[in-house]
């Protein structure tokens, strides 16, 4: 039996203060799980192609156009260093406490190491789609933390972090579009257009 984790971050809806605690808690985890990747492990390191694989799980008629845009405009975001990287990194699946953070219902991934900015891109997008309390301030804070602190953790540059954030945002917009195809097709189309727009230069 699993202990009750209490309400999720979505339910608590704690705004910027929770966003700040979230970053502090997850930064500890990133530092604890950080490792140099090479050889076979480096090939499994979460890449653009793995993210595309997950995008294609939520097939809709225009998915191929989005996939082509990503392949044409996004170099690899992998690094020599990787840390815990979770997809479906949403406030519904995250449970935050003063001294811990828990995550439920992970997707099957070829590896759980990679660039965590992808997951943060998903989280940032979804708190805004949910119109959670202080969503804009929290999104700006987490984006800035990623851009300022992840380059040092992953020994990479801000461009790769920015691309990883964009990949996560794209994945979440496409997923949110997919789940609304029947219930709200107009909104679903709007979300998918937003995902496409992220890759049109």
Image (cartoon, rainbow, N blue to C red):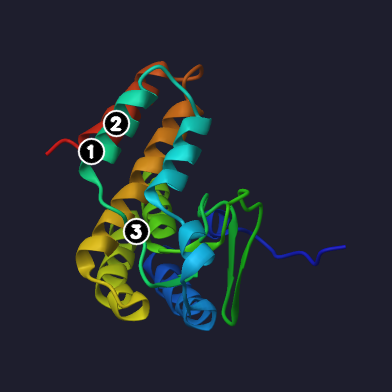
Q: Nearer the viewer, mark 3 or mark 2?
A: 2
User: On the image, which quarter does residue 23 sit in?
Assistant: bottom left
Indicate the secondary structure of the residue bearing disc 3: loop
Q: Is residue 36 above or below residue 112?
A: below
Instruction: Give percent across and percent down for residue 27.
Output: 45, 78
Q: Nearer the viewer, mark 1 or mark 3?
A: 1
Q: Which residue is mark 3?
A: 134
- Mark 2 neighbour class, 10 Å CA radius: few under 14, some 14 to 19, many 20 or more: few
Q: Quadrant of the C terminus?
A: top left
Toward the viewer: 156 or 94? 156
Residue displayed at 26% across by 55% down: 163
Q: Quadrant of the N terminus?
A: bottom right
7 left or right of 63 in image: right
Indicate the secondary structure of the residue bearing disc 2: helix
- Mark 3 neighbour class, 10 Å CA radius: few under 14, some 14 to 19, many 20 or more: some
- Whole-angstrom CA distance, mark 3 to mark 2, is 34 Å
Residue at the extreme front of the image, as rendered: 39
Indicate the secondary structure of the residue bearing disc 1: helix
Instruction: Give percent across and percent down for residue 47.
Output: 41, 53
Q: Which of disc 2 and disc 3 is earlier in sequence?
A: 2
Residue displayed at 61% across by 49% down: 107
Residue at the extreme right of the image, as rendered: 1
Q: Is residue 52 above or below residue 117?
A: above
Instruction: Give percent across and percent down for residue 81.
Output: 40, 74
Q: Which residue is mark 2?
A: 68
Q: Which disc number belongs to residue 72? A: 1
């Amino acid at each position: 039996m699993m202990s009750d984790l209490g309400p999720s971050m979505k339910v608590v809806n704690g705004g910027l203060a929770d966003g700040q605690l979230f970053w502090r808690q997850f930064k500890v985890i990133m530092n604890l799980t950080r490792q140099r990747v090479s050889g076979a492990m480096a090939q499994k390191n979460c890449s653009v192609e793995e993210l595309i694989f997950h995008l294609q799980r939520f097939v809709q008629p225009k998915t191929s156009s989005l996939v082509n845009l990503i392949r044409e405009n996004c170099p690899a975001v992998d690094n020599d260093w990787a840390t815990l990287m979770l997809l479906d990194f949403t406030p519904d699946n995250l449970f935050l406490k003063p001294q811990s953070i828990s995550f439920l219902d992970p997707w099957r991934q070829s590896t759980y190491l990679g660039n965590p900015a992808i997951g943060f891109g998903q989280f940032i997008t979804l708190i805004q789609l949910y119109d959670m309390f202080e969503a804009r301030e929290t999104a700006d804070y987490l984006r800035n933390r990623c851009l300022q602190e992840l380059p040092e953790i992953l020994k990479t540059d801000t461009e790769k972090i920015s691309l990883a954030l964009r990949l996560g945002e794209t994945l979440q917009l496409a997923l949110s579009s997919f789940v609304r195809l029947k219930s709200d097709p107009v909104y679903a189309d709007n979300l998918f257009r937003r995902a496409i727009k992220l890759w049109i230069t």
